Amino acid sequence: MNGANALVETLADTGIEICFANPGTSEMHFLAALENPRIKPVLCLFEGVCTGAADGWYRMRDKPASTLLHLGPGLANGLANIHNAKRASSGMVNIVGEHSAAHLRHDPPLTSDIEGLARPLSHWVRRAESAQSIAWDTASAVAKASEHPGRIATLILPGDTAWQDASGSIAPKIAAPARKVPDAARIDAIAKVLRSGEPAMLVLANKATRDGPLELAGKVAAGTGCRLGSQFFTARIERGAGRVPLERIPYAVPQAITFLKDIKHIITLETREPVAFFAYPGRPSLMKSADAVVHTLADDDEDSTLALEMLVDALGLGAATPTRQAAAERIMPSGKLDAISIAHALCAGIPENAIVVDESLTSGRESMSYTLGALPHDMINNLGGSIGYSPPVATGTALACPDRRSICLVGDGSAMYTIQALWTQAREQLPVTTVVFANNSYNILKAEYANMGAGTAPGERALSMIDIDRPTIDWLAMGRSMGVPGVRVETAEDFAKALLDANGEAGPRLIEVKLY
Ligand SMILES: Cc1ncc(C[n+]2csc(CCOP(=O)(O)OP(=O)(O)O)c2C)c(N)n1
């Protein structure tokens, strides 16, 4: 047994099932060790796909996946989606190959400061110094990544550590610490606030937006009249007909301020008070009203379900009946593709138990409230703001939940960052429908140009940095070249039909939605 075998064996022993990999010469012993049938290796053709897929896996399984990245440059290619995962509180274990210590002294071409690259976006970084200690290092990395909230653990694997003898080394059993118990006095104080009848909103995030805690929050709302909301972006919301619905705090600052203006108490679970995504000249960063008070019901590392149980008890609302989302009427749209017809098509086309990964930006942003009454599904958003997250994340969700259809809604600009994910979806025959909204533009930036006060409309040069129409991207050809069949639609009825058709397929499909 060498160090690489010990590493892979320990990953499997500690519950890691999958490795999203893009290997190089320094990782050949790790590749050999992946013959171990207890870990599924999945090849991704860009490291941003590896790290995004690990994020998607975590969002559905609530436990980390591993990645294999090739030295500093491989890690650097994966960093943007590590950033997105970190902001979404997803855990992951990154294994980063490295030269042997003896070779590094000579400054070979791939030498870089891997710790320096990893540290700002990792909660835990370690260089495995010997084959004898690597089992320990690996168990520590997995335990760190498995904490609540999820953590980014990066383990650097020098070549000599991988190839040296590790026989006799043993991994410790390290249990991830349990979620913290919220303070009872704080819960009682919040119960008092809710009993006062002053306008209040619970803002739920992370693990609090699942069915169980939503039911509890629904009881609090039913008994006290408070509202239930979410930030504009949430790691995963279980939503749809029959579920307790959340109101979404708007993205745009003026709308968010209007939305929040009457709320006197903002009560947070695993999140903070609403903050604008960007600073705009003359607009505030914080969007609550001047006299609103923020109360923390459950901190990021606390058990929000327990906090809600304690709150329901304190309020004596165990028997309250939550208001549940009514089923939306399924309307088959026709004619022009716009926010409403896209919404109707999605509402009719989201199958039961689907996993919707939303990066539709301007094409879907106004449509998502219409899908609240669709069949029960999960909705995943990007909390980190680095675009190109959704095709990789949908790859990870589909591997995590192969019996459910993942639906990736993505703008054409965003899709171009990590479109290689289609190749992995084809190779693994994953149940993913990728909907590319082809408006040939970074459309959102047109509005942001004016919002920022840069001018009323972009000039010719600015526009040439915003429009992506020259040349036009052929999405069907893109999918076909990577083994994903697709269809191009130009009307609402064709879009609705294409979504329903894709639901009946076992493997990946692409729908190019042509927008003019
Ligand atoms: C890594 C990264 N680079 C650049 C941006 C800035 N940015 C935000 S949205 C966007 C364009 C998105 O275009 P598209 O996906 O086509 O959606 P649309 O705006 O057309 O709806 C860009 C470039 C970003 N958020 N992340």
Image (tube, grey):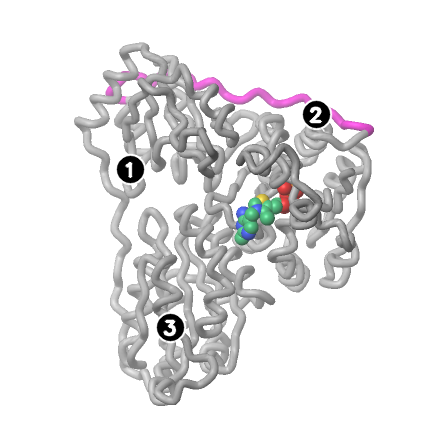
Marks 3/2: CA–CA distance? 55 Å
Please report the bounds of the magenta region as a residue range. Answer: 313-335
Horizontal relation, residue 44 to residue 303: left or right: right
Q: Quadrant of the N terminus?
A: bottom left
Which dot, 3 or 2, sits closer to the camera? Answer: 3
Q: Quadrant of the C terminus?
A: top right
Q: Nearer the viewer, residue 292 or 100?
A: 292
Most extreme residue toward the top is 197
Q: Residue at label 2?
A: 330
Q: Are marks 1 and 3 in contact (CB under 8 Å)?
A: no
Q: Residue at x 32, y 12 (%)?
A: 198
Q: Residue at label 3?
A: 113
Q: Secondary structure at mark 2?
A: loop
Q: Residue at x 41, y 47 (%)?
A: 87
Where residue 484 appears, x then y in whole percent? Answer: 73, 57
State whether the magenta stretch is mostly helix, strand or loop. Answer: loop
Marks 1/3: CA–CA distance? 34 Å
Marks 2/1: CA–CA distance? 39 Å
Q: Residue at label 1?
A: 299
Where residue 6 appears, x then y in whole percent? Answer: 36, 76
Report the disc number at residue 401.
none
For the question of whether residue 409 can be seen, the reply is no
Q: Which amino acid type is shown beneath numbered disc 3? A: Asp
For the question of whether residue 196 can be seen, the reply is yes
Q: Earlier in the sequence, mark 1 or mark 3?
A: 3
Q: Earlier in the sequence, mark 3 or mark 2?
A: 3
Q: Residue at x 27, y 11 (%)?
A: 196
Q: Which amino acid type is shown beneath numbered disc 1? A: Asp
Q: Secondary structure at mark 3?
A: loop
Measured along the vertical axis of the image, is residue 469 above or below residue 378? below
Horizontal relation, residue 250 to residue 320: left or right: right
